[in-house]
Image (cartoon, helix red, strand yellow):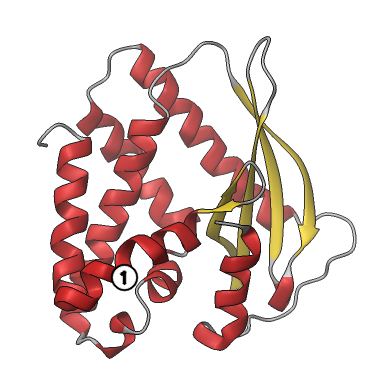
Amino acid sequence: MRAALALAVLAAGLLPVPAVAQQAGTTPGARATVARLNEAILSLMQGAAGREPARARLQRFLPVMLDTFDLEAALRVAAAPYFDQSAEPEKRQALDAFARRSAAQYVDRFDSYDGQRLEIVGERPAPRGMLLVDTDLVRAGKTPVRLSYLLRLEGDRWRILDVLAKGTVSQLATQRSEFQNTLRGGGLAALTRDLNSNADRILGGA
């Protein structure tokens, strides 16, 4: 799905409008958030090359994901309107499962290392006071893969709301589409079960 779809979801009012940040020049806080995630991704790749077990890589990566991503805001969009209509304990269980499944997907996707590096190459203003930070996954002898991170300002911190693969394919829009059948069939509790089961499959039953 295209970036426009995810931004349209946000523009529809599912999330509050964050404070508008200065867009002139660069935004060090946003870049620092993306740089920390990039370092953790490279560590995942290097750990996989060193045959570190998937569960150990997940345990190292999950705290970074929780710190750099605004997972609650992302799940509020991806699971709308069911997330906001649910009780607080059910929301917390769903958020824990969403975080675990999301981290497991990174463990699965970044599972080899052959000298790759991640380079922040620029930033752009996005709708509703948000910011896009572009990163290239550089591979020897191959065309770089573009990852664009959509960040929103939460208090005084920039956190990642969405990832656009190849600069256009929205992770958040894909998740929203993926979750809808489960949510319609069994609500947030069913989604929680599915997310945990999916994480277990990715991790080989861990």
> Which quadrant of the figure contains the C terminus?
top left
In the displayed structure, would residue 177 be above or below residue 83?
above
The percent position of residue 69, horizontal first and vertical second, equals: 47, 58
In the displayed structure, would residue 74 be above or below residue 65?
below
Decide if residue 118 is in sight here.
yes
Residue at image point 34% right, 50% down: 102
Q: Quadrant of residue 189?
A: bottom left
Looking at the image, the residue that sits furthest to the left is: 205
14 sits to left or right of 21: left
Residue at image point 36% right, 48% down: 63
In the displayed structure, would residue 112 be above or below residue 14?
above
Q: Nearer the viewer, residue 101 or 180?
A: 180
Residue type marked 1:
Gln
Residue holding disc 1: 180
Q: Quadrant of residue 194?
A: bottom left
158 sits to left or right of 97: right
Q: Residues within 10 Å of mark 1 (few under 14, many from 20)?
A: some
